[in-house]
Amino acid sequence: MKTRGLVIEGLNVELVQQADARQAAALIQVGAGSHDEPTRWPGLAHLLEHLLFTGSTGWPDEGRLMPWIQAQGGRVNATTLARHSAFFFEVAPSQLADGLARLQDMIAHPLLDNRAIGQEVAVIEAEYQLLQQHQPSRIEAALLHAADSPPAFRQFHVGSRVHFGDELPALQRALRQFHQRYYVAGNMRLWLQGPQPLDALEALAREFVAALPPGSSRRDIPVPQLSEGTHWQLGGTPAALWRSWLLENSDGVTLWRAFLLDEAPGSLLATLREQELAETLELKILYQADSAIWLALGIDTAHPEAVNGLIDRYLAALIQTNQQQHQHYHQLARSRFVTLSPVEQLRQRALGFAPDENPPALLSLAERLTTAPGTLLRCTPEAVEGSQLTQGFSLALSPWQPSAPETLPSAAFFFYPLDGAVATGRLPEQAVALPHHQPDEAAATLILRPEFWSTFSPEAGDDLARRLRPLFAMLRHQGGHGSWQEVEGVWQLTLQLPPDEEAADRVLSQIVTVMTQPAAHGQPPAPETIAIPALLRQLPGQLAANMNPPCWRAALKGGGAALHSRIARRLSALSLPVNPASPPTRMTSRTGMTHLPHSSTDNALLLFIPLHRAEQLTALRALALIYEPRFFQRYRVEQPVGYVVSSRYLRCADQDGVMFALQSPDYSPLSLLRYCRTFLRSLTETLADADLDAIKTRLLSEQADQPLARLRHENGLAEPDAAQIEALSQADLQQLHRTLIQDRRRWRVLFTGGPVA
């Protein structure tokens, strides 16, 4: 990557050229957040974030950033933090200039009309009600409550209908004043990233700043002052321990995060898992001032005292690490960073988690972590006496006095690289039939997935994921990468093998051994706290024809003939056959409506309309591109139904279809289903207005030579090619659209809340 930093008319600009990137991204950070709001208007910064997307002078309705990005298949979002707000998007490189023009206009010239204000107040009210039961938000509120000053740490900032009131003209004036004060060039920072040369990115940045209001807004960002009582317990939440530190600066934090994210044997996380103390950990920045950073480490555990003692031992071991290990973990952090999408890389840069060019000083940070002021928060599902009203949350929060454990768990922390190699199991004599694509490529990628139209249950998939995690971490230390996760609704093993053939064979031998062991009965997956993600999580099980796969399907891309031979022999040791000669038998999934219980009081509906004829897949993907922005425009902007409004093409458990999702506190599932039907019927006469040439260009740009796509093609499953895309006609779209509406017997509906009929 090549970078360039400069200041243009007071605007701080960071440019990143990533020559091999297929996408480009932009992020504008404004130096104003929830702690900068007038006391009279709590939630004003959050409301303004919403409103900037609702229309601006140049794009008052159609063509504005969010629907335009969605129509291009890009990503767009925003966030409001304590002292910053950020707006970001990702598109194809050729569309970066058009996206920047829209971002510029919405930042500099928002309409902020009363109609949009009223609509977004209702949306924020719904979000506020949802957050009351959102455990991560409640935990963060409890963590921030430990700061006595500034007072903003305990004030309400989400926003609600009660706090905004009914006087829209007064609220509009407050919004405009806040915008005029803080949304000026000298109070912003712009990041641009893409494959374009740095000079081209700089030209875009100069054009962007030309229309921004000039000026600056000086602010004093105070350092948090922690209360005398720094140990708290929060009742009614999943068991966890959160430990925080108030540090003078952020030097070394990104490198420490690389150590914390390691899951290989000897790491903190692996040790917690081996001793059955915890499964996950998270490092987050609670607050950043000009001269301080407030860090928090969260660990899900029912044994907070033991884990706290283990953290102390871990920090003592960290102090003993050497420069070679620092360099190794720094390289891991950089390797992990470059695999992120461009927009996620920019978010990490804005948050301060992007790795530096050279390893920072870790030992001084480790020493500071042992002496810096901080807090402890114990989260427990038990009832806790006491109550605190803070930041709009009513929390069962009270002081906590941790007791020293009688004995601390034994722990032998060690770090990488290690001397010596793990022994490799005997290579089987038999070999499976393994397709080998592009053998001339040096980098080797292996995929292994269940038979088509089948998958594993979430419990079985998560159990195997837990057992494979240490091996994937070992693979990363050897220069490779591995994952076992749901891809298109099906559990899939993906291995990017290291260049060293012996190392690749060694790790594959260990992975095959783990995958042949009987499934353990671990903890069920943690429930999703928001209804729509919970429905999406259960959709593969609702669509898959078989939850007990009869065989595996595998393919290798890249790597030499010798490596291919080893892999084919290793895979023969799996307990299920791999790539049997018999072709997969297409199976149909269940249809109809299913009520799925969920803790949320909202009504949520997930409608999946499957494709019946494989030869219409190209038309389906084109229709989904037409549906997506129009569905959002209809039910999020013109006729607000809820705060989750989404539509897109979806392949799930090898079923191709189009998905519609709605979540609302006000409308019943039956009403939400009617809205979906009404939307589809209303498009029948307007499909001819769609820009078919632009849609074809988009579909062609999404063609990718992935191992999974080749595996599907070899087994007779549909994958659109360039000729099919070019041949697509308006008549094809109209015909499939009518079929999707008329063949309602094939619709699959999942819902939470009240009865659908």
Image (cartoon, helix red, strand yellow):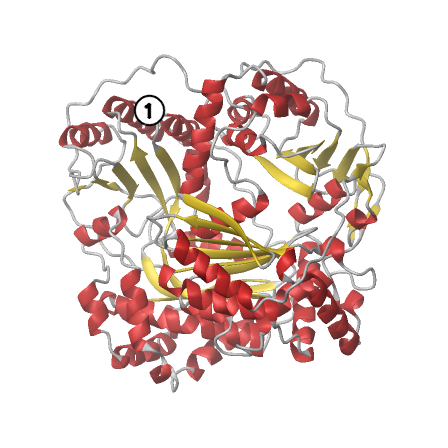
Q: Position of residue 571 (x, y in %)?
A: 23, 31
Q: Is residue 442 left or right of residue 112?
A: left
The residue lying toward the viewer, choosing from 557 and 674, is: 557
- Identify the image quadrant of the C terminus: bottom right
Instruction: Give the image location of residue 428, x and y in percent.
Output: 19, 23
Q: Is residue 519 above or below residue 46?
A: above
Which residue shows up at 66% across the image and 70% down it?
120
Instruction: Please provide percent x and percent y for residue 625.
Output: 38, 69
Task: Examine the image and state in which quarter residue 738 appears.
Answer: bottom left
In the foreground, 140 or 218: 218
* Residue to which mark 1 is pinned: 510
| In the rendered image, the vertical position of residue 437 relative to residue 191, given as above or below | above
Task: State whether residue 22 appears in this view.
Answer: yes
Q: Is residue 657 left or right of residue 294?
A: left
**Residue occupying image coordinates x 19% and y 41%:** 579
Q: Closest to the observer: 373 or 530?
A: 373
Q: Is residue 668 visible?
A: no
Q: Residue at x 75, y 39 (%)?
A: 234
Q: State the residue in front, 728 or 167.
A: 167
Query: Quick check: 731 left or right of 163?
Result: left
Compared to 277, does 729 lie above or below?
below
Question: Residue sitting at 62 percent across and 22 percent down?
Answer: 364
Identify the image quadrant of the N terminus: top left
